[in-house]
Structure formats: C-alpha cells, structure tokens
Image (tube, rainbow, N blue to C red):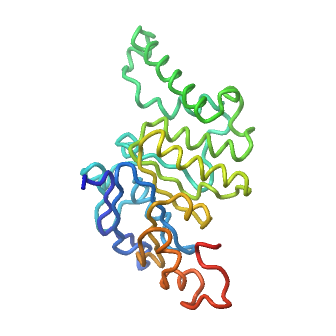
Amino acid sequence: MSSPILKIDSITMRFGGLVAVNRFSMELGSKDLVGVIGPNGAGKTTIFNMVTGHYEPTEGTVYLSGKNINGLRPAFITQSGIARTFQNIRLFKDLTVLDNIRLAAHYTVEYGLLANIFRTKKYHAEEKRVHDEAMELLKIFGLEDKKYHLAKNLPYGQQRRLEIARALATKPKVLLLDEPAAGMNPKETKDLTELIRWVRDKFQIAVLLIEHDMKLVMEVCERIYVVDHGELIAQGAPKDIQSNPKVIEAYLGTSETEETGPTPGEA
C-alpha cells in the first residue's frame, strides 16, 4: 500500500477546558473520496481548521505527503497542496468570476517584484499562463460565459461551483469541502453529487468532505469517518456506517431505530 497523501495522527484541540476534538486519526490516499460526518457540534469543522492551519493542534500531527505541516500558516498549507471551500461561500463577490480564479492561482507565478514593476517578458508570459489556466477551469465548470460577471450575481449553485473551481486553481493534492450542499435545493444537490465525483476523477486528487446531507454522503463517499463530541466513533464503508448502532445513537439519541425516525443513511 502506498503512503497516504494526508495523514492525521491523534490530533486534539482544546479551547481552555473544552476538548473540541480528542485524538482524531485518519489517512487519505492520493485519490480517495472520504466523508467526515457527525451531529452539530461534533468537531468536524475544527478538524478541517487544524488540517488547513487555522488552528494548530494542541496535540498530535498532520502530515501532507509525509511532511509535518503543524504550525504552518493557511497560505503556506495551500501552497503545499491543500485547498478548501467553506460552508458559507467565501468568494470575492465584488470581483469578476475570472478574477476570482486568477487571484487564487496567482501565487504560482514565477516572476519577482522587478519583473512586475517593469512588465518584463517573463511577467507577460506568466500572466498569460494564469489567464489561460483560469479560462480552462471556467470552461470545465461551465462558467466560461460568466467570466466577466461579478461573483455575487451568480445563482447560488454556480457560486458553489466557482468556489470549487477557485480551490482547484491552486493545484491541490487534497481538496477539502466544508458543507458543500449547504443552502442548495434538491436539483443543485444532485448536480453537486455528480460534480464531486467528477472532480476527483478529472483532477486525480483526494477529496475530503464534511456534509450533513446523508444522501449525498452515502452516494459519493467511498469511506466515512463519524465523530461525536470530538471523538471518532466509527469508520468504514457507507453501508457499514448506515447500520452502525453507535452512529444511529449519536444521531438519534438511541441505539434503537424503531419508531425513532430515519437512520443516518435515510435522512
């Protein structure tokens, strides 16, 4: 078995006396599509925040391609190969669709300050490369005809697609999606389910997602980790998670499914 692209080794996050996440571990292969689920307040977003450098774990280590990335600033973690979207869409809403992509890709340019000031041949070549790559992403995501529209004027589903495209402009090895279906209608959610799988296959990257829409998770994820009160309580294939008594209890407050409503896979 090849080494994992992302390894999370017993990470813990404490805020004063509160333990938000306790010794959470997981591994992600280079083309895995994995979900992290759990009730509200279970610690899912805190895990993402530790992986992406918004929090430094109180204990434990996050490895990307075998390298310890604890303590790196979010920008450096992005440059190292981890990109992220957020539950609340964080586009540059007063910039055009094209400029949102170009801005995300700009850290990849290979010219210095003097080349920028004097607009050298190297500067123009690199700017053209970024522009062409941005346009290719917009074409792939069906947003080419919206390139000069302000991001805030796109329909919600297209804003979400733009956010994913912008994350991919950083050329990540791992894409983290935080509640990508939040606020979507059933048609948009169905389209998103297909998009997530397509992105993994098209870009040959690992995808890790947090999501409350259990239908989406069960359909798209190959493996699922379940957290409750900051603890990992189950992991496995979707069919195993759906019938796991600990998972049912975490969601429903009981280990009995009779007359208590849907199991996680049916919600």
Residue placed at 73% from the left, 39% from the top?
Answer: 154
In the image, taking residue 259 as reference, residue 8 lies left or right, namely left
Q: Is residue 118 above or below residue 175?
A: above
Image location (x, y in percent) of residue 98: 61, 28
Q: Is residue 207 above or below residue 35?
A: above
Q: Nearer the viewer, residue 235 or 161?
A: 235
Image location (x, y in percent) of residue 36: 48, 65
Image location (x, y in percent) of residue 246: 48, 84
- Where is the N terminus found, in terms of image quarters? bottom left
Q: Nearer the viewer, residue 50 or 177?
A: 177
Residue placed at 48% from the left, 23% from the top?
Answer: 130
Q: Nearer the viewer, residue 227 or 240?
A: 240
In the image, taking residue 198 as reference, residue 89 lies left or right, namely right
In the image, taking residue 213 as reference, residue 109 lies left or right, namely left
- Where is the C terminus found, in terms of image quarters? bottom right
Q: Nearer the viewer, residue 126 or 261?
A: 261
Residue placed at 46% from the left, 12% from the top?
Answer: 124
Image location (x, y in percent) of residue 206: 41, 49
Q: Is residue 173 above or below residue 49?
A: above
Res. 19 in view: no
Res. 259 in view: yes
